[in-house]
Structures are given as structure tokens and as C-alpha cells.
Amino acid sequence: MTPDHGNKPVDELSGVETTGHEWDGIKELNNPLPRWWLWTFYGCIAIALIYSVLYPAWPLLTSATPGVLGYSSRADLEKEMSDVGAAQQATVQRIAALPLQEIAADPDLSRFATVSGASTFKVNCSQCHGTGAEGAAGYPNLNDDAWIWGGTLDDIYTTISHGARSPTDPDTRFNLMPNFGSDGILDPQAIQSVAGYVASLSGLEGGADTPEGRQLFADNCAACHGPTGKGMRENGAPDLSDQIWLYQGSLAAIEQQIGKPRHGVMPAWTGKLSDTRIKELAVYVHGLGGGQ
């Protein structure tokens, strides 16, 4: 008996009812889906319904249905973070109790402090010193071996703790370079001469080692920067004979700094960070490559 397809289109070659869709002369046959596929599909629906009953699923106005099992991914995360914190507590307590030298000498403590210090650096220090601690104009590069206030673990710890020229810390690192130009200590010609001499110490273009410049340097600058311009870390006076400049290494920039110097400010982190965090940060900065 010929099957009755009613008014539905039928493929002439196969005799199977079609959906009525046709592309480039190819008709879509309306064959039934395989039973295994249908049962898989129905099974997925059943599993989804069971899941939505057992676990949080359906969104409400301010939350979601809690599910009869009471599962919470937030609670799981909080527990996991609590467990991690508890596991780290013993190491944190050791760092808090030990001096910096012993922390750096212990491979496990040093590794922990470095990782933790790197995280603290990115949150609190990278805005000025850069994410790689490479510094910028007015912000020292912490990867080299030029340290204005010293690069030992204790020196770095002190600088981080009390800052530089911090208005809130009485124990801050503090120095001020005189305004030789704006305060009328040196006239413009003298500033040019001493700037030329300073530039010659590091071989900058335009530098000139003249008797006048050398004498002006000895009279006005050597007390802080040393007789040969090597700097004095106890005064926070930078080395003028290397190729590292806080602002810019040019004759014009040196003249500007002598005439009306710029004085940067670093905040004191005591009170903002715990002593343990400051220790970890000091270990991290010291290990960047330029620590002493």
C-alpha cells in the first residue's frame, strides 16, 4: 500500500516526505531522528531538571534558587582561601620573627617572601616604579646597582618603611639640594660652568672640565656629592660620575637641576603595610638584580 502523505511534498526518487526546504535542487527529507539521539536528548533534559533542583540554578531578583543540597561556590572559595591562609601562617610568623638576613638566607623563606613581595609591589609600588621596577623620570630604577640611600637589605627596608621626604614620618630619609639659581647662590654663568663640569664627569655631550667649573663644584657640591662626584649615600647624594640619571642625562637637565632642583617624595609605608609585608617587599626589591 502506498503511504498517504496528504498534501505534503514527497521526494520522487525516495518516496519520502520532505520538509519543503530545497537548496540548489536538493530537497530536505523529513526522516525521523535516530532513537539513540532522541533518548540522549531526553536524558539531557532530565539531568538538567535534576541539577536545577539539587544545585543553584534559576535566577531570582536578588539571588538564585539555592538547591536542596545547599551547595555554594562562594563558600567553597572562602574555605579554600581560609585553608591556604592557615597553611601560610607558619611561614608568615617566621618571617615576622626573623631578621632580614636570615630570611634571605633561607631558600624557602626567601622564595615565599619574594613571591609575596612581588604581589605587594604590583599593588603599591608599580604606579611609580613601573611593573618591572624599571623606573621613570623622577622615579629610580630598582633593577640597577645605583642606590641613592644604599642597596642593602636593611637600607631598602628603612627606605620602604620611612620613605623619602615623607611629610608624615619624622624618621623619613631627608635631604634638600640648594636652589643655587632661584635663591641667587650662583649666577647663570657659574651654573653653566659647574653644570659643564658635572656633565664631564660622566662623559655627557657638552660637558667641559674647566678650572672654574671644578672650583665651583669643590666649593658648592663636593660636601654632599664627594670631591670626585661619586656621591654619598649617607647624605642621599647620587653619584654624578655614572650614566644613571634620576631625571635626564643632558647638560640642559643638569643646569635646570642646579638652578631650581626637583625633590621627589616617596611615601612612608609603615602603618600602611605590616612589618612583615615590608620585609617581604624589601627581599623582593633586593633580589631584582641591583641589591647589595
Image: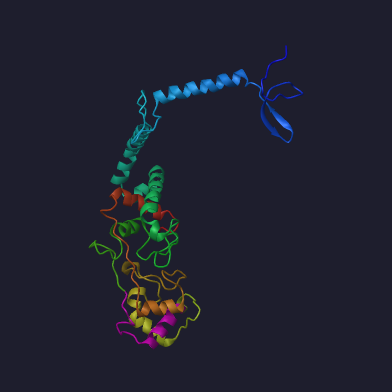
Residue drawn at 51 percent across, 23 percent down: 44
Tell which residue pokes out farthest to the front in this image: 7
Quadrant location of the C terminus in the rendered image: bottom left
Quadrant location of the N terminus in the rendered image: top right
Verify whether residue 181 appears in magenta: yes
The part of the image, by quadrant, that contains residue 60 is: top left
Indicate the position of residue 233 as horizontal and vertical percent values.
35, 67
Tell which residue pokes out farthest to the top in this image: 1
The part of the image, by quadrant, that contains residue 290 is: bottom left
Residue 140 to residue 19: above or below: below
Indicate the position of residue 22 as horizontal and vertical percent values.
69, 33
Indicate the position of residue 163 as horizontal and vertical percent values.
30, 61
Residue drawn at 40 percent across, 87 percent down: 212
User: Which residue is at the front of the view, 63 or 208?
Assistant: 63
Residue drawn at 37 percent across, 56 percent down: 125
Indicate the position of residue 96 as horizontal and vertical percent values.
29, 46
Q: How is the image coloured?
A: rainbow
User: Which residue is at the front of the view, 24 or 94?
Assistant: 24
Is residue 181 rendered to the left or right of residue 23?
left
- Bounds of the magenta segment: 177-199
User: Which residue is at the front of the view, 57 or 213?
Assistant: 57
